Image: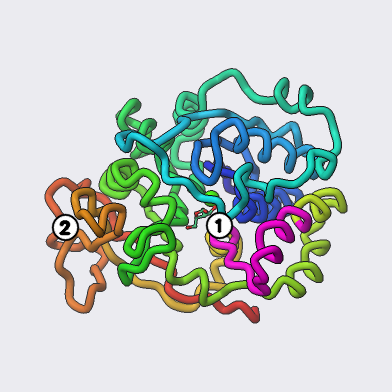
Amino acid sequence: PRLVVVDVDTGTDDAMALLLLLAADAAGEVVLKAVTCVGGNTGLGNVCRNTLRLLRAANRLDVPVFAGAEGPLVAERPITNTYHGVDGFGDLDHTDFPGDDAELDAALQEENAVVALNRIVNENPGRVSLVCLAPLTNIALAVRTYPAFRGQLRDAHIMGGNTQGLGNTTPAAEFNFGADPEAAQIVLESLACPVQLTPWETCPEHAIPLEWRLETLPALGAGGLALQLLTAADRAVNLSKAKTLWTCCDQLAVAALLRPGLVLRTLRRHLTVELAGSRTRGQAVPACVCRGGQCPPACAGPDRRLNAGAPPATILDGFDVDA
Ligand code: BDR
Ligand code: CA
């Protein structure tokens, strides 16, 4: 089975994506080697704690969790995001998460996430699928710190950015790219492996009715407590805002990795990220001119800063949600 390392800012949709990966791990489809955490939806401490709460609920505290960057590479302050509540899990009462927090703090690895990312990839060259569900700060730091890292991945699956210029955080920026545009640019322009990108615009088209999710979650086999935990967090975040549809971006990215047959349409495009625009900072933009916006496999004209050997990213443009 393929080895997976997932970088998260848990976050209710990160939590759902983690449950999918745990179910795939239990089914022998993947081996979840590690979870690396980064500040994003909430502060790094909450991200680590939410991640460990989820793993404990799924009885998988054996999966190592590493803390990485607290905030973006350059921006002075992280973008605030309260979509998932201030604490990332719906600001529920502590009693909704039974168990001793000291146990969770003890379970967090001492090794830094960036160091661990490189070590695991280095120990398994060409075998690790990197799943990026958060601002790309940890990944950019690994790229910049360890020259071999970018060439040793099997592939990367990134939730972030956009293809039509539409954002969910600013009018032009999707959250993961907007929260750390420099990191997103470094990663998109550096990774030498195949990259599969789930952009923001694809996600609301495949939002999930809450009732449907409550019916199907138990089938993921993650355990009743995990179901209870996520349902509670989701209720706090979404039902309080009278939403009946849940836009679960990170889950879509992982679903595409685990079940490629769900993907209906793709675009192939070299992408980079706008850094300077006063209104467009964080927007994903094409990095080369190809007919119809579709790069052939050996694109002739990518931006010269792009890694010459890098194939264009595969951008997921539509899913078959009925499959
Ligand atoms: C992304 O931003 C976060 O709020 C979600 O967890 C997801 O990774 C969607 O734009
Ligand atoms: Ca996320």
Location of residue 267 by image quarter: bottom left
Q: Position of residue 45 (x, y in %)?
A: 60, 30
Is most of the magenta stretch helix, strand or loop?
helix
The CA span between labels 2 and 1 is 28 Å
Residue 298 sits inside the magenta stretch: no
2 or 1: mark nearer the eye: 1
Identify the colour scheme used. rainbow
**x, y percentage for residue 258?**
60, 60
How packed is label 1: few (under 14 Cα within 10 Å), some, or many (20 or more)?
A: many
Which quadrant would the C terminus be assigned to in this image? Answer: bottom right
Left or right placement of residue 260 versus residue 135 in this view: right
Answer with the quarter of the image where residue 109 lies: top right
Look at the image and give the residue range highlighted in magenta. 231-251
Q: Is residue 223 visible?
A: yes
Q: Nearer the viewer, residue 280 or 206?
A: 280
Question: What is the three-letter code of the residue carrying label 1?
Answer: Asp
Residue at 31% in and 53% down? 282
> Three-letter amino acid code at disc 2?
Pro
- Residue at x 69% of width, y 46% of height: 91
Residue 284 on image: x %, y %: 30, 59
Is 102 left, or right, of 85 in this rendering?
right
Task: Name the residue that disc number 1 marks.
Answer: 250
The residue where tag 2 is placed is 302
Residue drawn at point x = 15 percent, y = 68 percent = 289
Q: How crowded is the residue under tag 2: few (<14 C-alpha within 10 Å), some, or many (20+)?
A: many
- Identify which residue is drawn at 20% across, 54% down: 277
The reply, left or right, for residue 206 in relation to residue 148 is right
